[in-house]
Image: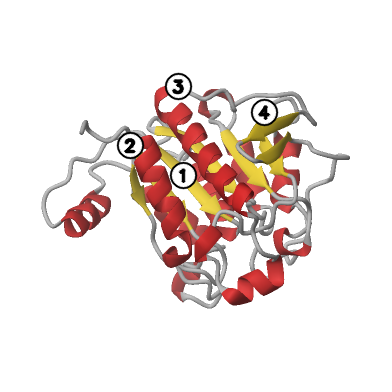
Amino acid sequence: MGRPIGIVWLQHAFFQTKDNLVALAKSIAVNTGAIVVAPTITSNPLATGGCWINGAPMASAVADLFVAGRSALQMSADAARGGPVWLPRPFVLSGNSAGGNLVTGAAGDTTLPGGDIVDLRGVVLYDAVDYGTSMQKALAQLSGIDDRPVLQIASPPNPCNAFGSGTAALLSARPDQFVGVELVNGTHLDAEGPNIGPLAEAVCGQPQTVNVEAVRVLAADWITNALTGSSLGIVSGSPGEAISVGGATAIVLPAGPPREPSTDGDAWLPLG
């Protein structure tokens, strides 16, 4: 087995933990050859220093993990392996729902002085929800020489994804770029698949098996493309175009009438 091609930071949704993304994390690791880091971060907005999943200080802290010697990441990897692990420099930030908001904010922070924008290869989102215009601000930072692919696997607008707020932010920031797809009959937590909790399933719906598999295929393809340049060919398309992904159907964004991004800082829901 060769050396890993990169690092993938995989962030869970609001009120969830890393356990809700176990199957996706394993799939990404096996199908990309990357090291997957999947931490649990509190969803408590009263956490010390604003370090909760939707907190700007937490996004900054995630970005800081990738600078210089990456000592915290190295110690974590060594502890998980039970011995020294070689960590590659290229990395992809990836997150589900509020986790998508967090990693987009972290990606934006890599563009600040001292940040590791050079090694950031892309951002892969699973129905990310824009909290307090955090995604909009970060996407504005990821422009010009700091432009990086930011791709979303979305479900149709619904209460659990704040009626498509993350997708709207992406489309507004990058109107002429490929920014991802919407899964037909998708749910907000398709990325969790077999690891979805009963409460989340009751609120946001039961993921269809074909859509769960489609998320894994798309995630692996987009992450591999970001880290190596190779692809199965699902990294482009015309707005509204239907793409078959196994037994699922993905519609290139925008999949319907354009929606304006929210500017309401309180427009978020429990699983967003």
Q: Earlier in the sequence, mark 1 or mark 3?
A: 1
Q: Is residue 242 left or right of residue 111?
A: right
Residue 144's place in the image compared with 152, above or below, is above
Separation (CA) of disc 3 from disc 4? 17 Å
Q: Nearer the viewer, mark 1 or mark 2?
A: 2
Q: Nearer the viewer, mark 4 or mark 2?
A: 2
Marks 1/3 in contact by CB < 8 Å: the verdict is: no
Q: How many marks?
A: 4
Q: Looking at the image, which residue is at 46% across and 59% down? A: 21
Q: Nearer the viewer, residue 115 or 152?
A: 152
Please say whether residue 162 is visible from this viewpoint.
yes
Which residue is label 2 attached to? 33
| The C terminus sits in image quarter | bottom right
Q: Nearer the viewer, residue 28 or 121?
A: 28
Q: Percent from the top left, x then y, of residue 109?
A: 49, 45
Which residue is label 4 attached to? 178
Please say whether residue 60 is visible from this viewpoint.
no
Which residue is label 1 attached to? 93
Q: Looking at the image, which residue is at 69% across and 66% down? A: 204
